[in-house]
Amino acid sequence: MSELNDLNLNKLMKEQSIQTLSGFDAETRFRTLAAQADPQRALAILDRLDGQNEIRP
């Protein structure tokens, strides 16, 4: 049972790491695009990311 709990915890930590890195990458990309003065493209990326983060039943 302990091994199963460790496996689930490892999977949870891996998933959390992926989510954190994805968020960091998205923010970095947004800031890079914003600095290059292309606000329409940057806003389009944010809209796409917002759509990915919607909670679906």
Image (cartoon, helix red, strand yellow):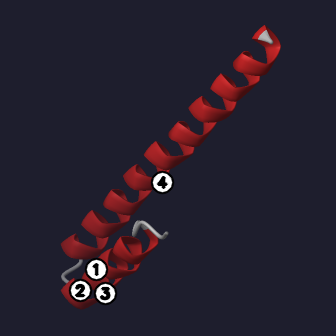
Task: Tell me if label 1 and label 2 are in contact, CB under 8 Å.
Answer: yes
What SS does tag 2 mark?
loop
Please state which amino acid type lies under the numbered disc 4: Ser
Name which of mark 4 and mark 2 comes first in the sequence.
4
Quarter of the image holding residue 27? bottom left
Task: Tell me if label 3 and label 2 are in contact, CB under 8 Å.
Answer: yes
Q: Please name the residue shown 28% across and 79% down the image.
A: 42
**Which residue bears the numbered disc 2?**
38
Q: Please name the residue shown 52% across and 39% down the image.
A: 16
What SS does tag 1 mark?
helix
**Which residue bears the numbered disc 3?**
41
Name which of mark 4 and mark 1 comes first in the sequence.
4
Please state which amino acid type lies under the numbered disc 1: Ala
What SS does tag 4 mark?
helix
55 lies left or right of 10: left
**Which residue bears the numbered disc 4?**
22
**Which residue bears the numbered disc 1?**
42
Q: Categorize mark 3 by other alpha carbons within 10 Å: few (<14), some (14-19), many (20+).
A: few
